[in-house]
Every structure is written in C-alpha cells, then in structure tokens.
Image (cartoon, grey):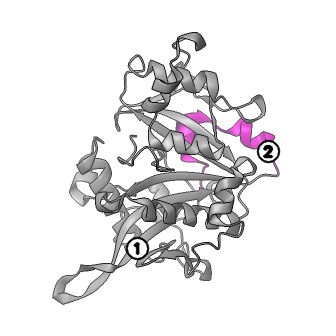
Amino acid sequence: MANAALSPRRLFGRFVPQRHLPTGRINVLPGIGVPMPVGRLVGSSLDASLGRIGSLEVRLARTVGEVKRAQELRYRVFYEEMSAIADARTLMTRRDADAWDAICDHILVIDHANPEVKPFGKTRPRIVGTYRVLRQSVAERHDGFYTAGEYDLQPLIDSKPGLEFLELGRSCVLPAYRGKRTVELLWQGIWAYVLRHRIDVMIGCASLEGTDPRRLALPLSFLHHNCPAPEGWRVRALPHRFTDMNRLSREAVDARAAIQALPPLIKGYLRLGAYIGDGAVVDHQFGTTDVCIVMPVANISERYIAFYGADAGRRAS
C-alpha cells in the first residue's frame, strides 16, 4: 500500500495489513461490520489522553462508533484519494474495514475546534488521523499477526521469547491535516502506547508505489544493500510471495537518487533505527510493493526519545 501523501520530512506513513481472518472468542457488535471481542473497547486504559497540541488531541478509540469513523477516514484516503481497489462490501459501506479492526487498538487524532455536524444540529469532535496497533499478546489469542500473510515472522518471534512485539497498520491523515502537529501527535500516541505496554519491537509492512519491481530496482536495491536486518532480526517474505530486492549491484546504486525515491514512511523508520527484511512482496490490491520493517525499541535514536520524552510526557495533556 502506498503512503498517504506525507511530505519527505514526515516520520511515518501506512503499514499494510494482510487479509487472513483471526480466530478466537469474538462477538459481532452492530454497526462496525467486523467481529469485536467482548469488552475490547471497555477499560480505564482507553479513557486517558495520550497527548495534545492546541485543539488536537491523540488518544485511543473508546467506542465502536469511533472505530467505525476511523474506518470511514481510511476509506476516504485509501480508496478515494489513493489507488486501493474496493470490493463490493467496501464500496457499499464506504468504510475500510477488516477483521483485525476487532482485535486492534486504534490511535486517533481528534480536532476539537473543527467538529462534525450531525443530524439535528448535534456536533462531535472530528477524527482527522488514525493508526491501529496490535500487540503480540492479543494477536496470539486470535491467530497471530496479519503481516504473517506476507512475511514469515514466527522464527523471529520464537528467537526472542522475552520480547513483546507490536504491529502497526492502517495509518492515514486527512489532507488538510498533513502537517507537523498531526504527525507529531500520532507518533506521540505510538510512543506512549509502546511505553504503557512495555513493547520491545515494532513490526509492519511499508510500501513503495507500483507493482513492477523492475521499475523499483533502485530503491529496492538500496534497501537490500544498505539496510538489511542482521541475522538475529531477519524476516523473509513467504516463498510464494517473495520478490528479490537485489536488482542492482551495490556499485550501480546511486544512493542519493535512491533515497529520494524512497517513500517518507520508509525514510522515517530508517531514521528511527529500523531494519529491512529479506525480500519484497507485490500487493496488487493496493498497487504497491511492500518491504518488511523491523524496529527494536532499543534501536530508536536518542534524538527522538528526547523529543517525545523518555516517559512520553512532552505533549501530555
């Protein structure tokens, strides 16, 4: 999936969820269109704000209705603005929804100064950005991570039995809000969530636009030669989805041009200390070529930890 048109200086974009269905004890709640575990949206941990800049606040979704509105925002960005191909249900509901919405937490950026007007003149704060996160402890109760549909994650997870993994996905921001404050708040929310749940490793798929790896030879080869995960952190694309990233020799890669060709998503995560997995995956539904990001929290640059605060308190409400 392609990044949601953030400028090259931004630090994050969108990870690509896969589409196998989780299992486990789940009930269907009305209005959201996907199964929802009982009690998933209930609990004091959902009530606290994770940060605020002026009228913008970052926090977790608290209700099924808020998750539904996040799905509507994702539809506007991924399907109307970008090139994702919608199935009949997605077109009918005008929501980007899948089964993982039920087991993920959803980070929201809300604009309190620009409310949405509901019928009969009622208003509600506007959701302008979203990101969903899935903890390993939750994923393992529901058939694992969705990135497993593209990459073989299990050997890495098995080799790190004392670490807690977090998967990131479905990030997007409304066009009018693609500025420093919104992106900063989304990262504030992720960092606060990482600290709250004692996350050790963040994983997910980042995307380059296009489905012809030959046209992406320069950035793919740059990542292959310069950013590979070391042996102890390496994940590999599934055999039936594996696309070789080693398309140009190291000597043939123009590093400056390659970096310019990388999406903001990937450049941002490399700045933070992320590794790149072995092999790319072509996603025809979203018109992208994906690479796997593996980012140990211990690798995150001290610069960014200092910016957001070791206790995530810089933008605390």
Q: In the image, is residue 188 above or below residue 49? A: above
Residue at (70% x, 58% y) in the render: 199
User: Label 1, on which residue?
Assistant: 110
Q: CA distance from mark 2 to mark 1?
A: 36 Å
SS type, badge 1: strand
Closer to the camera in the image, 272 or 159: 272
Q: Is residue 67 left or right of residue 141?
A: left
Q: Is residue 153 in the magenta section?
A: yes
Q: Position of residue 129 (x, y in %)?
A: 40, 63
Q: Give amino acid for label 2.
A: Lys
Near-viewer residue (160 or 193) = 193
Q: Which residues are magenta?
A: 142-161
Picture disc at residue 160: 2
Asked if residue 38 shows in the view, the reply is yes
Q: Nearer the viewer, residue 260 or 207?
A: 260
Q: Is residue 258 left or right of residue 292?
A: left
Locate the N terminus by quadrant. top left
Task: Look at label 1 and name its amino acid.
Answer: Ile
